[in-house]
Image (tube, helix red, strand yellow):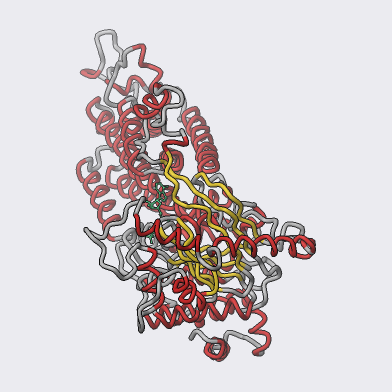
Amino acid sequence: MGSIHIDMAAIEKAKANGNGVEDKTKVESDYMPKPKFPMHLTFNDVCCYVPAHFEVPGMISTLKKALMPRGSKNKPDSKAAERQILHSITGVVNPGEVVAIMGPSGSGKTTFISLLAGRNHARHTGEILYNDQHKPTDKAFKRQLGYVTQEDSMYEGLTVFETLYYTAVLRLPRAMTDKDKRERVSIILEVLGIAHVKDSIIGGFRVGRRGISGGEKKRVAIGQELLYNPSVILLDEPTSGLDSTTALNLIHTLHTLAQVGNRTIVTTIHQPSSRIYQMLDKLLLMGQGHLLFYGDASAATDYFATIGYTMPYGMNPADYFLDVASGWSGEAKEGSGHIQATDPQLKALLSAIERGPRGGAKQTSKADASSISVSLRKDSGKVAVGTERREPGASFSTQVFIIAIRSMKDRRFEKFSVDTIFTMSFVSLLCGFLWWQSAVPSNTRTTEGAMDVSGVLFFMITYLSFSLLFTSIFTFPNEKTMLMKERACGMYQVSAFFFGRTLADLPMDTALPLLVSSVIYVMVGLKQTVGAYLLTMSLVLIVCFTAASLGLFLGAWFLNLKRAQSMATVLMLTIMLTGGFFVRSTPSWMDWTKYISYIMYGWAALVKIHLRDALGRCEGENASEEGICDYGTLDLVPSDTYGGTEITILLAMLLGLRTLVYLALRYRAREK
Ligand SMILES: Nc1ncnc2c1ncn2[C@@H]1O[C@H](COP(=O)(O)OP(=O)(O)OP(=O)(O)O)[C@@H](O)[C@H]1O
């Protein structure tokens, strides 16, 4: 693995595995085609600023901020309250090069690479341009960038193959056949050395299962980006967590990809071995946000020697440069070794760089940057990405289908879990035994009997709808990172995600409530007619979908589980207490609350279906002095219809809430 030779062997292997690859030349051009637009990257005088103080979000801090005098240097949005974390970073990366960003922890590597990828929204100045014209944040251009983040966010319930295949379907041009997409996935699996784990799940905390290793996960993340053959690949710490040989192989693969495909590759790297270091084309060394060196990796040792930092014999250059960048260049440092922003060692190094014979790496790079800018400007017409018609990706229906299938597979460990089935079975049986045959006609003729049945109907819809409401809250907050990540590279439309997720929930959101309510129906002995059964099941489903929509809305709006759960508890209690079962006479000023309770409508309709005949037939002791039947709370339910009004209101609520879910999702997933 790694070199061209080994890559080809891997490709041959994929071919031998019956993936239908016809000849080596075809594979080569399919898998490693030269990107259409080789990309020069220029970054000029890039500075970045973050708030100096941690600001607690909320009303109190907003109030405090508002009350602070204008111009106060502590005012959170004032420039004085900012900390500069990148200082004038300048340079050029040419196509076919692998550039490594190195520096001690906290030196600004992630900040810088995320700025190059257009995924950091901290205030920054300076210019980052690809081919002298495309900003990384340009919508059309973003799709040319492959960006592998430090944290690998993936669907934990999917296998490695599924992860790559679904990405391929969503990201690759729709003109490509399914066979070609599968072939590309197989080749990438081989090239990255993860073919042996293709059927293992990603695994993680959410699914409660251990899956592939951290290093393998990293390679899957890289594979996801390689799939669509981007011109620029940016990677944040791709080798962290890998053993030195695997790390070497990975860098070797990146090197091959850069050379064969003329790709531009920039990667941050923590502590490369000397063999990895030798493979790098350029080094960008950072220390506390300052550019300490940028140029040929092979020239760095000589350069530092010329400014008075000679590397001790036999040392790994990467280790030495990290020491230098940390302000520890060989002489014992007094104290704990902790470096402050005003660290004298760093200051000495920076002034040595300024005085140095090459006038500092920064100045060299600035010259490079302007000369390349000039040459690119001459033939910029040839390299304009925006002017080229983009090959359309997956169609809307494919997006919806793939998102639905992917979600179902990802959650295969959740909803079918023994716990859920046990809880549901237990509750339905408990309910059935407690209200055993209480709905037989002889029983419902009495007030107590009718009240019993109304009780079980109320419990049934309350329990089922609240279970669904609570499960649905998790949907969007759990998928927030993935949604943001996939939206950032334009993989699908928000509406496709919305419909796909809705579709994915449908089977389980339908099956479980139907199962539970059917068991209760039979055990309690509710009305024995097909019409009543079908009407009851439809009502249960409408109520459950309405509740699920409320849960989805809270999740989509807050995208934060804790806040969504607190709000759900408040709403659930309100909906339950105003449902008409517990409180017979609501204070008049609070009477309106019952109209927002979907439970009230669901329960009222169920009472009409099952107790309509019984209501009004009370005799003897159930009749009041005036001869009016006293059914307690049931009297609140008008018995004039079969629940048509309630069903219509519930359907309107369902539609309204689903629309709100979509709008909330759209608002939250705005592309920045
Ligand atoms: N949004 C932010 N708010 C506050 N401070 C920030 C923010 N982003 C970055 N920083 C600070 O900027 C500095 C550089 O952070 P960055 O993550 O870029 O470092 P790094 O070199 O990638 O570190 P590591 O190697 O440990 O990942 C750190 O001191 C960090 O605390």
507 is higher (above) or lower (below) than 615:
below
Task: Identify which residue is drawn at 63% across, 67% down.
Answer: 172
Q: Quadrant of residue 491?
A: bottom right
Q: Quadrant of residue 143?
A: bottom right
Left or right? Give the position of 58 relative to 360.
Answer: left
Q: Can I make out residue 163 in this image?
A: no
Q: Quadrant of residue 613?
A: top left
Task: Identify which residue is drawn at 67% across, 56% down.
Answer: 134
* x then y, percent, for residue 205: 31, 60
Left or right? Give the position of 357 relative to 387.
Answer: left
For the image shown, how many numbered marks are present on the structure? 0
523 is higher (above) or lower (below) than 651:
below
Depth check, front residue: 211 or 590: 211
Task: Identify which residue is drawn at 40% across, 51% down.
Answer: 478
Depth check, front residue: 659 or 602: 659
* x then y, percent, for residue 249: 45, 82
* x then y, percent, for residue 600: 38, 28
Residue furthest to the top in view is 626
